[in-house]
């Protein structure tokens, strides 16, 4: 790879704000945003029934008139209503040696290989400036969403800088933001964007005319990248640019009546509601909150809030960001129908529509759950973007009301959907992860793809540390067993988690404290673990057989205290929700895939520029392989192999049997995920 040399620049806090606004207002806005930025890492929900909501275009005081929402059958131990948790900033968590640190390092190398000027090509050209380098290929050179990758790139570099402190990431961010500011100055009255025809397609959306591509979706990626740049790096220029984009949207949308605006939302529009909600949090400007609520798609919100599943046939990754917006708006307004919609959607997708990996859908769409068997032969199941967004929704719902069910799903999808999506050699990302038997994982190319899943892939592997730990006052939630260092500044505490999980089912937690401190540690007892045991400083403290609960340890902790957590894993079946005769094999939270013989694959042959359409050529239905269990059950069919996390599957009609290994370790070969169990 050829690495671009980035000139070192510095973003000045007050720079880029003057431009027509009084200096004192600039300073107030910036100071407020600086103070509010940490809230985006985990805002507490409003308490009681005093909240703000929009009525006839105005934000006012009100009371909750929504129906009571039923409890989830999956929920297990769920926090009490009003109990919340906050994630730690990425800068407070450092990954230690293990699969996620290796994944993060691969991703950093890819991000550093990208040429910023090529990503900026469309933006400079659109502003009347000469591009400094040719545009990248794939979706960047096509009409669907030109410029979207730059937003993902900003988000990923910002999160990776926060996660690692790599100065090279900060230099790239400052350079890109400075170039975007130059684009704004070159065309001061226009919208900074990567569309070849400027704001034409956005105005076409607003005015109900035919549209090329997905303009709001594309603009959202830029806005989210600028938001993340400010939140993680406090880059004031990024916030100034974000405000200008949002002001353009606000002004352009004002003349549009609600029926036409809602009709416009039938077209994919990304997380516009979420990012505008976040901008309201940063600036205190109520008009951004009003605009965020306008971007709520009532056609989706209303049935979900009423507990009705109308998802069949809908484009999955269009819907999930809308629901993330519902969750954000509940935190800002207290309106229960937003919460009801977000919770019901999550339960419906996770409990009725997901595969064992945590992924869902076929050819990017939800299908009727009862028809799941016929979709197992598809090569276009489990779009990686959908798993990315389901994890973002899961994280938001956990923060609003902590639940082991949310943490269990997060772990499952993180290992089997996200870690499994990255080529362990090139660092590239999948678009689909097929349930089709004897099919390989296909990855995007370095410079000729730039799909949606390329962009979210950049982000996925930049933020592995964002959901390991949560906290609330003196309570610490340990949600993931992942090698890491945590700095809990408010409590003067550091926690080091050393583990080889998932190769071994256990972890050691070592506390470093400035003084003896009363804390409550909540250790997740995963739903897949039959019995969990905890030792304190070598002495047995507790045995828990209550899977799906938190083991709560409340005491005065002292510097050097050591907790050893034992989490025995076992092989088990994960039946499909609407076809229990079809199941995947799992070991603890890991989906086990059978390695299938197939044609030799040359190095790099699975990096396919057009892999989005490649899988659509496989249409014939394949027979599901049988798994006949004798009297010994799974213990007789699955035996440990040689090496960590290696297994062998044998049984009637399976010939010599199959090698099993975790799905996240499958690469450059062919596999099988589902079995017909008898």
Image: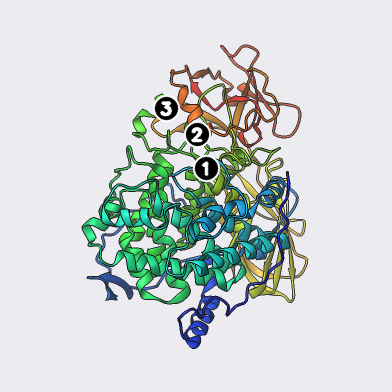
User: Mark 1 to mark 2: distance in Å?
Assistant: 8 Å
Q: Which sits earlier in the primary sequence, circle 1 or circle 2?
A: 1
Please state if 661 lies on the left or on the right of 674 as rendered. Answer: right
Q: Earlier in the sequence, mark 3 or mark 2?
A: 3
Which residue is label 1 attached to? 451
Q: Position of residue 272 (x, y in %)?
A: 40, 59
Q: Residue at x 56, y 41 (%)?
A: 137
Q: Helix, strand or loop at disc 2? A: helix
Query: How many residues crowd around disc 1 within 10 Å: few (fewer than 14), some, or many (20 or more)?
Result: many
Label pair 1/2, CB-CB below 8 angstroms: yes
Which residue in the structure is indicated by mark 3?
A: 375
Looking at the rendered structure, the secondary structure element under dot 3 is helix
User: Which residue is under mark 2?
Assistant: 612
Disc 2 crowd, CA 10 A, few/some/many (<14, 14-19, 20+): many
Considering the image in quadrants, where does the N terminus appear? top right
Closer to the camera in the image, 37 or 617: 617
Q: Is residue 637 above or below residue 143?
A: above
The crowd level at tag 3 (other Cα within 10 Å; few <14, some 14-19, many 20+) is some
């Amino acid at each position: 790879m050829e690495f671009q040399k980035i000139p070192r620049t510095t973003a000045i806090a007050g720079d880029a704000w003057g431009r027509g606004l009084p200096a004192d207002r600039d300073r107030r806005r910036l100071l407020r945003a600086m103070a509010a930025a940490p809230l985006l890492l985990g805002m507490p929900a409003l308490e009681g029934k005093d909240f703000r909501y929009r009525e006839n275009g105005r934000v006012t005081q009100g009371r909750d008139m929504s129906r009571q929402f039923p409890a989830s059958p999956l929920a297990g131990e769920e926090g009490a209503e009003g109990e919340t948790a906050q994630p730690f900033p990425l800068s407070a968590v450092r990954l230690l040696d293990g699969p996620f640190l290796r994944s993060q390092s691969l991703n950093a190398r890819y991000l550093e290989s990208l040429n910023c000027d090529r990503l900026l090509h469309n933006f400079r050209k659109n502003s009347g400036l000469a591009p400094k380098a040719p545009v990248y290929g794939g979706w960047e050179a096509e009409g669907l969403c030109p410029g979207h990758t730059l937003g993902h790139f900003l988000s990923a570099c910002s999160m990776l800088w926060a996660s690692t402190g790599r100065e090279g990431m900060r230099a790239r961010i400052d350079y890109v933001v400075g170039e975007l500011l130059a684009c704004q100055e070159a065309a001061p009255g226009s919208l900074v964007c990567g569309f070849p025809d400027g704001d034409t397609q956005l105005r076409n959306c607003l005015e109900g005319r035919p549209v090329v591509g997905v303009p709001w979706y594309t603009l959202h990626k830029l806005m989210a990248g600028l938001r993340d740049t400010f939140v993680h790096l406090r880059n004031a220029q990024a916030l100034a640019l974000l405000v200008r984009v949002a002001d353009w949207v606000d002004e352009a949308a004002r003349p549009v009546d609600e029926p036409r605006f809602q009709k416009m939302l039938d077209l994919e529009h990304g997380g516009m509601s979420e990012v505008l909600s976040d901008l309201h949090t940063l600036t205190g400007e109520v008009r951004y909150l009003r605009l965020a609520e306008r971007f709520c798609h009532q056609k989706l919100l209303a049935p979900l809030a009423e507990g009705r599943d109308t998802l069949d046939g809908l484009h999955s990754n269009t819907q999930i960001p809308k629901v993330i917006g519902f969750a954000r708006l509940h935190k800002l307004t207290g309106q229960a129908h937003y919460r009801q919609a977000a919770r019901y959607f999550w339960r419906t997708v996770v409990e009725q529509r997901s595969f064992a990996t945590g992924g869902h859908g076929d050819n990017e769409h939800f299908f009727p759950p009862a028809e799941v068997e016929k979709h197992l032969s598809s090569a276009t199941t489990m779009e990686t973007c959908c798993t990315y967004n389901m994890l973002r929704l899961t994280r938001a719902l956990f923060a609003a009301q902590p639940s082991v069910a949310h943490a269990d799903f997060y772990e499952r999808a993180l290992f089997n959907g996200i870690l499994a999506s990255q080529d362990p050699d090139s660092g590239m990302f999948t678009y689909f992860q097929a349930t089709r038997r004897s099919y390989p994982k296909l990855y995007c190319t370095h410079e000729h793809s730039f799909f949606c899943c390329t962009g979210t892939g950049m982000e996925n592997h930049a933020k592995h540390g964002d959901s390991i730990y949560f906290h609330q006052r003196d309570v610490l939630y340990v949600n993931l067993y992942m090698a890491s260092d945590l700095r809990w500044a408010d409590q003067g505490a550091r926690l080091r988690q050393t583990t080889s999980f998932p190769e071994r089912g256990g972890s050691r937690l070592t506390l470093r404290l400035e003084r003896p401190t009363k804390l409550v540690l909540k250790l997740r007892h995963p739903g897949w673990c039959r019995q969990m045991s905890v030792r304190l400083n070598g002495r047995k403290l507790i045995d828990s057989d209550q899977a799906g609960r938190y083991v709560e340890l409340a005491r005065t902790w002292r510097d050097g205290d050591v907790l050893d957590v034992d989490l025995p894993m076992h092989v088990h079946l994960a039946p499909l929700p609407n076809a229990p005769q079809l199941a995947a094999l799992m070991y603890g939270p890991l989906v086990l895939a059978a390695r299938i013989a197939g044609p030799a694959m040359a190095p790099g042959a699975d990096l396919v520029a057009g892999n989005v359409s490649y899988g659509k050529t496989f249409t014939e239905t394949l027979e599901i392989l049988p798994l006949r269990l004798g009297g010994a059950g799974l213990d007789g069919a699955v035996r440990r192999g040689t090496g960590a996390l290696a297994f062998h599957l044998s049984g009637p009609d399976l010939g010599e049997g199959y090698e099993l290994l975790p799905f996240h370790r499958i690469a450059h070969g062919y596999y099988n995920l589902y079995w017909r169990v008898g």
